[in-house]
Image (spheres, helix red, strand yellow):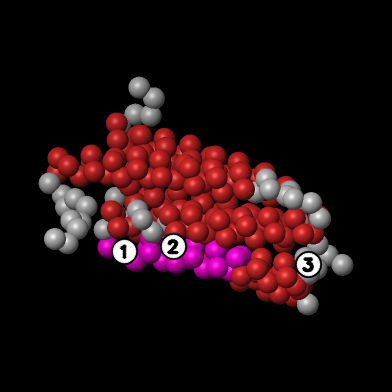
Amino acid sequence: MSHLDLPLWAAVPAALLLVGGAVLTLLGAVGLLRLPTFYERIHAPTLGTSYGAFGIVLASVIVFSVSQQRPVLHELLIAVFITVTTPVTLMLLGRAALYRDAPKGRQGPPQPPT
Amino acid sequence: MSATIMGVAIGLAQLALALAIVLATMRLILGPRAQDLVLALDAVYVHTMLLFLTLGIRTGTVFFFEAALVIAVLGLVATLALAKFLMRGEVIE
């Protein structure tokens, strides 16, 4: 008997959330590698910090809550922390990139189609 | 039965996250300019934190949760400091 011997109604959603979150994070990493310019690449890893982190954290909450038979919610702290801090850091990084690109006449962010 | 489902799911998740770390490291090696390196380092931090959470689900201890929280805070501070350095040329003015 390990702590992973959950009832089936808890194991299936936890497994789906875990695999879904990890695959979305992998897609974000593929985008980080494949997209052509920096201003497009900066969007890709946020797939992992939003949906990926939420999926894995929710799976962890389900597993620990069911196996210990009490609400275990401290993993949500990580999800809230990541969701709040990632936009701040990436906005600062994007502004720094714009500032570095401006005087050299390099190509800025791609313009939206008109 | 459900232990098998969870074991397979955790294995797949760990494989996907490890592959994500490899891809982000490739961007860290290739990245043409400094902001690409900072972005890739931030991605490596986040993926490592998610890998620690998955490892915590596999072992069933709270130890990895605390390690993941520390990694998240350190990643935030590192990325903020590097972005500030790229912007202004020094971290603390």
Question: What residue lies at 45% left-to-right and 45% top-to-bottom?
Answer: A86
User: Of the numbered discs in the image, which one, if any, rests on residue A35?
Assistant: 1
- Image coordinates of residue B17 in percent, x first then y, are 55, 63
Residues tagged 1 and 2 counted as in contact (Cβ below 8 A): no
From where the camera sits, is residue B44 visible?
A: no
Task: Name the mark nearer the viewer: 3 or 1.
Answer: 3
Question: What residue lies at 60% left-to-right and 65% top-to-bottom?
Answer: A17
Q: Quadrant of residue B7?
A: bottom right
Of the 4 image quadrants, the one containing the N terminus of chain A is: bottom right
Task: Name the mark nearer the viewer: 3 or 2.
Answer: 3
Q: Chain of mark 3?
A: A
- Image coordinates of residue A66 in percent, x first then y, are 77, 59
Whether residue A16 is situated above or below residue B26 in the rendered picture: below
- Ranked by sequence position, the earlier of labels 3 and 2 is 3
Q: Chain of mark 2?
A: A
Give the side of residue A64 with respect to residue A51, left or right: right
Give the side of residue B18 with respect to residue A4, left or right: left
- Image coordinates of residue A56 in percent, x first then y, are 60, 59
User: Of the numbered discs in the image, which one, if any, rests on residue A29?
Assistant: 2
A109, B33: nearer the viewer: A109
From where the camera sits, is residue A49 visible?
A: yes
Whether residue A104 is situated above or below residue A4 in the rendered picture: above
Main secondary structure of the magenta stretch: helix
B24, B12: nearer the viewer: B12
Q: Which residue is mark 3?
A: A6
